[in-house]
Image (tube, rainbow, N blue to C red):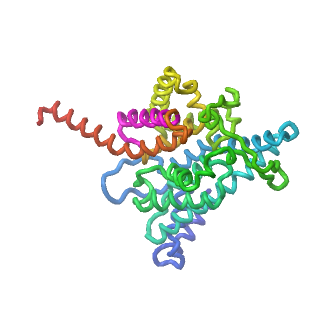
Amino acid sequence: MKALRNYLNKVKPNFEPEGKLHAFRSVFDGFETFLYVPNETSKTGVNIHDAIDSKRIMSMVVIALMPAMLFGMYNIGYQNYLAAGTLEQASFFEVFCYGFLAVLPKIIVSYLVGLGIEFAWAQWKGEEIQEGYLVSGIIIPLIVPIGCPLWMLALACAFSVIFVKEIYGGTGMNMFNPAIAARMFLFFAYPSKMTGDQVWVAQDSIFGLGNTLPDGFTAATPLGQIAQGVDPSASICDMICGFIPGSIGETSIVAIALGACLLLYTGIASWRTMLSVFVGGALLAIIFEATGQSMVWWHHFVLGGFAFGAVFMATDPVTSCRTQCGQYIYGFIIGAMAVIIRVMNAGYPEGMMLAIFFGNMMAPMIDHFIVERNISKRLKRGGTK
């Protein structure tokens, strides 16, 4: 590491304002601060200083996403071999490699498009490269079905970076979660590639691995089956472990729980937000189940993107509430609204996407009223009108 540090110090003058590579100063700064924690202090304003910077926080979230991503890769291969009836003849390595080769292009496209735009934007504005896309770049491929074409994914990534982040001022200034915005763009612009029965299972062999399925092959998700009035064919064990059709990284509750434990242990994610999402969802689900309008209440947690959204997207520190009381309200609204959408509107069997988007919209107002209430209480305690 010392040799790398010495090399960076040696080439750094080339990227300074008078250096021959000064046009790429933002790019060099982005790589340097990713590898090493910067030793600079804030230049203006009053700030709270911590031993960990935002790049380290984003890197920890990426690590927390690894179990969901790796299992998602295996499940993509599992669903393909299962649909072809050749699962028993395939090895673990073959199944995982097929899923790996199917998912990897989506991750590469997401990072190339998103980071490419952020690098170009930083160079154009003469600013530092922002690190927020480190997380969005991996979440976006995990919340789309395997059948989503790469060019659509590229459009969604470009839309989220330009219209959801950069025009608001970049990382930390965006009102909506970029990953949610990318999925909403795809859902409303290309619904046939985001819903239905033909997008959840990879249908072509890759480099001799996997199977080419018959034309017109369909496989509905358990949520899709419930929306059609059919009991889900998956067992409870498959629902919890994740051996069901669905978006790439959203199927395994076990893998998501491992990521949640890491985020909670490190204090990066708010346990108040995470807990209140499940409480709000459970309360509404129990009410609907009692009235005979819904499935078993806890099925909402193990199907679709409810758990993934609660752990990795509702807890986004930029777009969620900052006040402690506000986090309870914010999470409860998201959980409750996700279940309401699922039960009351069969056209949106998922629900979590719209619920988080609505929660993002409400978060600033919730914080505002919480802060105003606290100010009013303090003034009353001090005898000031």
Instruction: Give the residue displayed 52% in from the left and 26% down from the top.
Output: 293
Query: Residue 358 placed where, x, y %?
Result: 42, 44
Magenta region, main secondary structure: helix
Query: Residue 246 placed where, x, y %?
Result: 65, 41
Q: Position of 37 compared to 84: left or right?
A: left
Q: Position of 42 compared to 335: left or right?
A: left
The total number of labels drawn is 0
Instruction: Give the residue displayed 52% in from the left and 66% down from the top.
Output: 119
Quarter residue 11 falls in:
bottom right
Instruction: Give the residue displayed 42% in from the left and 47% down from the top.
Output: 319
Location of residue 112 with respect to 253 vertically, above or below: below
Is residue 55 among the parts visible in the rendering? no
Q: Front-most of 149 and 331?
A: 149
Location of residue 298 with respect to 166 vertically, above or below: above
Instruction: Give the residue displayed 55% in from the left and 51% down from the top.
Output: 187
Query: Residue 57 placed where, x, y %?
Result: 51, 47
Query: Residue 133 placed where, x, y %?
Result: 53, 55
> Which residue in the rendered view is the most extreme toward the top?
290
Quarter residue 332 falls in:
top left
> Which residue in the rendered view is the most extreme toward the front?
229
Q: Position of 161 compared to 110: left or right?
A: left
Residue 331 located within the stretch drawn in magenta: yes
Is residue 139 among the parts visible in the rendering? yes
Residue range of the region highlighted in magenta in the rendering? 320-342
Location of residue 257 with respect to 19 vertically, above or below: above
Residue 68 located within the stretch drawn in magenta: no
Q: Front-most of 205 and 351?
A: 351
Is the N terminus in the top left, top right, bottom left or bottom right quadrant? bottom right
Is the C terminus in the top left, top right, bottom left or bottom right quadrant? top left
